[in-house]
Image: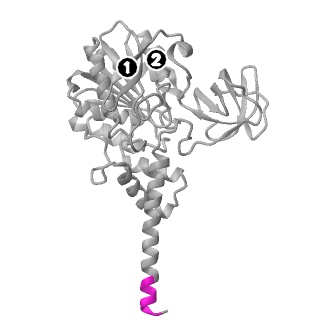
């Protein structure tokens, strides 16, 4: 082959790869970062219902179905709550038996394809938990943000922000605990959530812009009687809490942060999401950079969400080594930089944003010890 031909073929290949990377980046941005509560996280697997009788549910045997703890089970117009694995009950070798707590809606039919989710409850605080609440409107940057306000006697409010793949129903896992301890709770739906304003691109920016909606919730709480607030976020919601803690004009009112599975290394999370959407491995580095540029995420800034040296309030950080979406190592390094301020609570065997699900009692006792001085 002549040198000119070789050069032309090489150039065409490079241009083609570049175009493919740009297309992959747009795909990663439009699909991986588009809010989608029904979409599994990386590493999640679809589980087949073998049978459901009484308080026992038989599911496909997998790493997911063997996880300890309590989860929501969702799919095919059905939602249920499943508890721990049940041992000593006869079942096929390719299946696992879990305790069936309840079926919220729909029917668990044999052959139905479902997935486990950390979002245990469905509905609103009253229907799901019997808690009195008020639907309130929080004035936000893009328009009115719907929120649930569960009243409490204290003048320290807890403001919650859910994360990727869930809705404001997810924070309801800790609502009974917070209600028992008399905290008012404002559970926020933010941009691109159902019922909330949508952005022009319709994409999740991993807290980089969404934190301003949490900032609006702080203003609302202060205007309605809060002396101080605790920001409590999961996944990208935890990243929102961190950004609000250093950027909000009302950051002096923030008395503490509770972070569950925070996204601290944006590059690693975008890469995991892109890989889960079957972007070819060879294109991942270029695709991730293209996705970040396409979604407006700064590509010239360090991966860390927030410099811990900028924090001025105590932080409780729940995370686990098995998280495949938000790297555990980032949380460990983050906490190590401010050990006098940040308490790291490791939770083994937990998937992303499911630290409560694995061990609710231990989780809530750790939470109680952290919140007591802030009451």
Q: Residue furthest top?
A: 153
Left or right of 96: which side holds 16? Answer: left
**Is any part of residue 315 visible from this angle?**
no
Q: Quadrant of the C terminus?
A: top left
Q: Start and end of the magenta stretch?
A: 2-8
Left or right of 108: which side holds 166? Answer: left
The residue lying at 43 percent from left, 58 percent from top is 287
**Is any part of residue 76 visible from this angle?**
yes
Q: Is residue 137 above or below residue 85?
A: above
In depth, the one of 18 and 327 nearer the eye is 18
Residue bearing the label numbered 1: 137
Left or right of 106: which side holds 2? Answer: left
The residue lying at 53 percent from left, 50 percent from top is 276
Cα–Cα span, label 1 and label 2 = 19 Å
The total of numbered circles placed on residues is: 2
The residue lying at 37 percent from left, 52 percent from top is 292
In depth, the one of 110 and 331 nearer the eye is 110
Residue bearing the label numbered 2: 175
Residue 47 picture location, percent across and down: 67, 39
Residue 177 in the magenta stretch? The answer is no
The numbered mark at residue 63 is: none
Q: Is residue 3 above or below residue 28?
A: below
Say which element carries label 2: helix
Name the front one of labels 1 and 2.
1
Say which element carries label 1: strand
On the image, which quarter does residue 90 sit in?
Answer: top right
Q: Earlier in the sequence, mark 1 or mark 2?
A: 1
């Amino acid at each position: 082959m002549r040198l000119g031909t070789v050069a032309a073929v090489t150039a065409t290949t490079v241009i083609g790869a570049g175009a493919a990377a740009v297309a992959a980046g747009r795909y990663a941005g439009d699909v991986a970062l588009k809010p989608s509560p029904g979409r599994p996280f990386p590493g999640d697997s679809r589980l087949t219902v073998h049978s459901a009788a009484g308080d026992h549910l038989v599911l496909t045997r997998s790493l997911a179905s063997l996880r300890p703890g309590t989860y929501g089970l969702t799919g095919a117009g059905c939602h249920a709550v499943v508890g721990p694995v049940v041992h000593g009950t006869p079942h096929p070798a390719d299946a696992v038996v879990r305790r069936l707590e309840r079926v919220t809606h729909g029917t668990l039919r044999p052959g139905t394809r479902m997935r486990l989710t950390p979002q245990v409850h469905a509905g609103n605080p009253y229907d799901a938990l019997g808690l009195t609440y008020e639907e309130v409107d929080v004035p936000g940057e893009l328009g009115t943000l719907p929120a649930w306000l569960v009243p409490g006697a204290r003048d320290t409010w807890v403001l919650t922000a859910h994360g990727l793949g869930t809705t404001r129903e997810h924070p309801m896992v800790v609502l009974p605990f917070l209600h028992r301890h008399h905290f008012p709770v404002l559970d926020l739906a933010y941009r691109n959530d159902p019922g909330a304003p949508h952005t022009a691109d319709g994409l999740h920016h991993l807290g980089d812009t969404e934190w301003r909606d949490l900032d609006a919730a702080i203003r609302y709480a202060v205007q309605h009687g809060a002396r101080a607030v605790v920001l409590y976020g999961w996944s990208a919601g935890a990243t929102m809490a961190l950004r609000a803690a250093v950027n909000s004009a009302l950051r002096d009112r923030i008395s503490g942060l509770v972070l569950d599975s925070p996204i601290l290394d944006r590059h690693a999370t975008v890469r995991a999401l892109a890989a889960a959407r079957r972007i070819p491995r060879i294109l991942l580095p270029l695709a991730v950079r293209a996705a970040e540029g396409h979604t407006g995420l700064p590509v010239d800034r360090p991966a860390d969400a927030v410099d811990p040296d900028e924090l001025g309030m105590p932080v409780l950080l729940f995370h686990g080594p098995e998280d495949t979406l938000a790297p555990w190592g980032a949380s460990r390094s983050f906490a190590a930089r401010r050990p006098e301020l940040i308490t790291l609570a490791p939770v083994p065997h937990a998937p992303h944003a499911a630290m409560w699900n694995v061990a609710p009692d231990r989780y809530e006792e750790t939470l109680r010890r952290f919140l007591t001085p802030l009451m």
